[in-house]
Image (cartoon, rainbow, N blue to C red):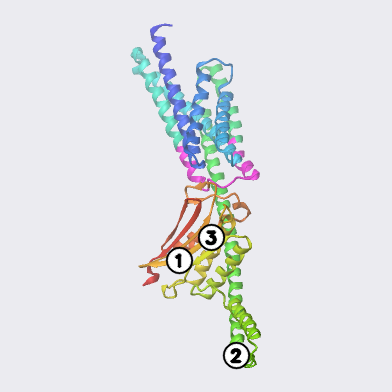
Amino acid sequence: MEPDEIYWKAVSDLSVILGLIAMGYCFYRLVEPFVENRKTAVWTGGVYAAAMLPVYFIPTGLDYFAACGIGVFASFFVMCRAERRNYRQKIFLAVTFFALRWFIFAAVNIIYDQLYGFLENTVYMRSHPSQFFVLYVGMGTFHTILAGLLMGAGVWCLLKAYTDKHTDMTKKELAMLSVPPLTGVCGYAVLRYYRDFYIIETHKMQNVYDAFTLLYYGVSVVTMLVVITLYQRIKAGQQEKLQNEMLAAQVESIRQHIEQVEEIYQDIRSLRHDMANHILTLERLYEGNKKEEARNYSADLKEKLTWQTGKIKSGNPVTDVIIWEAQKEAEQRKIRFCSAFYYPEDAGLNAFDISVILNNALQNAMEHGGQGEDPYIYIRAYQRNHVYMIEVCNSFTGTLQWDRERGLPLTSKEEEGHGYGLRNIRKIAEKYFGDIAIDIKDGAFCLSVMLSGTIYN
């Protein structure tokens, strides 16, 4: 190989290597928000670049289109091995990256060919043939930078369009989202074949055909983004509807709690009405020296009074009933239940809002508080200056996956109507200029709800 040929080959190889590194980085950026462990995304992008290098430097007889498919499949395999969940979403990521990569590179190649053809036929280049190597280096740099920028922009747009990144994808959703990239890639293959065939046969490029092809690639990318955006809006609407339905169910539950409170108060009024008769009966028993009967009668009366008034004294009858029912359920599940909750009447809080927080927090604690050797649920509330805090802790073993965008733990039950309790709690907290915090340590899951702001003025 002549020295000049070595330089030209070195520039070509370097351009390819930098391009593969850029594509691997873009693949990493696409996958990173969808996975829990950042290393998974790093391995995904790294494996893609590493798998594509031998295709270029080692003759395999494979078409580059098929070789790129193998590289994407290798990255998909790494994703699935690293995080064994939401496989359909990983298929979508692999298919989308594969299609976007070809749309971008095909468009960049057309721009590169047209610009290179124009520059090499200028008067300056014809009169300075020694500058063709400089032109080749400059155009190679231009190709690498433009491809990286456009690919990065495409990935950024995809991530902006796909907002709910940690929700499990159904088969129907996968099919809907995969149609635009797959049909676009089929169209790309046809257009590339005819373009290459035309250039080989005529040794020139057809500007109109290239313009039409560029338009097709742009429309394909826009179609992918539009479908993803529509899908996310539909998904958000479904989640909002389900969340509202759950909130309505909680409102109905609280209404039933209020009815129970009214029934208890009615029983208390009846008990007070009969109190004179009960006292008279006790007096007669003692006068007749029937102390044992009097003690039994007194114990029965005390038990009835305790049952009707309840042992929970939180400062609000509705929250009393909610905590009381949670305590009964915990006893049935053999979960130790402790309450130091109180409702501040002078804080300007809406009893309904506090009831929503308690219902959701205690329901979550009940579902997961039965873990460990000594299962427990502990709830307390306290007020410091202008901040009212509610804390619900329960025993917990295991690990949780997190939605980094919402800052909430993920649940596999969201599609069944679960997983919205913490969102409802956060919505109530934000109404009072507060927020929620979750702490997991020493075998305990602790939810803290802060309510603050002008409610105390």
Question: Please, what is the three-letter code of the amino acid marked with disc 1?
Answer: Ala
Q: Is residue 386 above or below residue 136?
A: below
Judged from this view, the residue extending furthest toward the top is 2
Q: Which residue is mark 1?
A: 381
Q: Residues within 10 Å of mark 3 (few under 14, many from 20)?
A: many
Q: Residue 154: in sight, yes or no?
A: no
User: Which label lies toward us, 3 or 1?
Assistant: 3
Name the spot of residue 415 as percent of width and height, x first: 61, 52
What residue is shown with label 3? 377
**Which one is in front, 240 or 78?**
78
Question: Reading the chain from its start, which is encountered first: label 3 or label 2?
Answer: 2
Amino acid type of disc 2? Ile
Give the spatial CA distance, label 3 vs label 2. Answer: 40 Å
Q: Quadrant of residue 127?
A: top left
| Residue 308 is covered by the magenta coloring | no
- Cβ–Cβ under 8 Å for marks 3 and 2: no
Determine whether the residue tagged by mark 1 lies in a helix, strand or loop: strand
**Which residue lies under the disc numbered 2?**
279
Contact, mark 3 vs mark 1 (Cβ under 8 Å): no
